[in-house]
Amino acid sequence: MKLQILAAAAIVCSAAFLSSCSEKVGVKYVTTKVESQTISSSVTATGTIEPVTSVEVGTQVSGIISKIYVDYNSVVKKGQVIAEIDRENLNSQLSTAQAQLSSAQSDLDYQKTNYNRLKSLHDKGHISDNEFDQARLSLQQAQATYAQRVENVKTCKTNLSYATITSPIDGVILNKAVEEGQTVAASFSTPTLFTIAKDLTDMRVIADIDEADIGGVKEGQRVTFTVDAYPDDVFEGRVTQVRQEATTESNVVTYEVVISAPNPDLKLKPGLTANVTIITKEVTDVLAVPVAALSFSPNENLLREDETVEDCKAEHKVWIQNGKVFKAIAVEIGETNGVLTEIKNGLKAGDQVITEFSVEEGQSASEESSNPFMPKPPSSKKNDKSKSK
């Protein structure tokens, strides 16, 4: 009998405790204000800064570099002499070609005179056709030899002009690959002597965009980028070209995208690595709400007795709280970036929409002390008595 009484008492106490806990459960609703915002989506990548126009200056003749008139960062004008190759061998080749031309000219003059003389005799029947044909053939060979010698002289003069290396454009020397006294050989390929950038105030970024992102990249899109040399500066540009050729490296496919990079203060230097953000989608000054507001729905099990819900049938809706009433508002949505969604119709600036709720539980110290299953603190009276002793 005593056990039954104790069990009943325990059940009553437990029920009272659970009831007390349930009353302590509170629901907190988080709201956000509907306001004008900018919704944007972007693609990130890395790229390399380089001049828009750069020219590699080489030489078409072999020889020893006798003079260099420029250095790194030298500003040059189109046609300006920047280096010279030793002319001794080239002058010798020209002299030889001119001597051969003079000899060919003499032979040609002789063959012309001989041909005319034999033609006159042939016309009178004093020589055979064979002799006359031989004279005509000798004249034709002399004419061909003379023409060849003329071309040889032109070639030698052209090569001699190549010994003077000039800048093909206005620009700045980025690279100097030779020094005075160095021998360059142009037998099989044209060696590069200098690299000249046309205009360092007009740069570009060549960025490698992953194949998963390239579909959203278009010409004309706004771009921001940073470089490690100036971590606090944000540079801007535009997509000027999306190249069709793919590059595959370690099974990763990327495409080159060319981005303009105005450089009026010359901060950007060729070769710097740029951390690029391409704005693939952007709408400004539109009403927007967090995406979470469109997925929120009240939990009726957590409503209090005096709270009600006014729902509506709509593809997209948000919830507002008006006193004790939770009301669904049908909305028309527009652009989204996964964080914010444009609201075209249904809300106005300043409206408060619910984005989430959280359940709060708590007990005060007085409530905890009333729990029959919790140990009670020592009596203050006993402490007072011990102090009086």
Image (cartoon, rainbow, N blue to C red):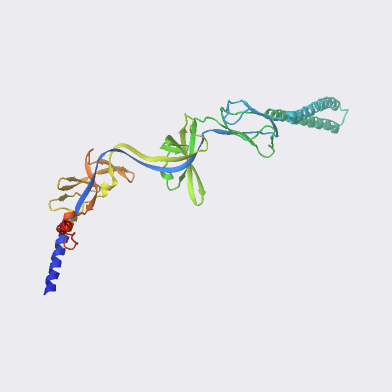
Q: Is residue 5 above or below residue 331?
A: below
Q: Residue 222, image x and y in percent?
A: 40, 36
Which residue appears farthest toward the front when viewing the image? 389
The quadrant of the image that shows the N terminus is bottom left
Near-viewer residue (288 or 156): 288
Q: Residue 345, image x and y in percent?
A: 24, 40
Residue 142 relative to residue 232: left or right: right
Can residue 232 be seen here?
yes
Q: Is residue 232 above or below residue 213?
A: above
Q: Quadrant of residue 218?
A: top left
Residue 50 relative to residue 345: left or right: right
Q: Residue 304, image x and y in percent?
A: 15, 53
Residue 242 relative to residue 305: left or right: right
Can residue 22 be seen here?
no
Q: Is residue 270 above or below residue 249?
A: above
Near-viewer residue (374 or 12): 374
Q: Residue 298, image x and y in percent?
A: 21, 51
Q: Is residue 357 above or below residue 178?
A: below
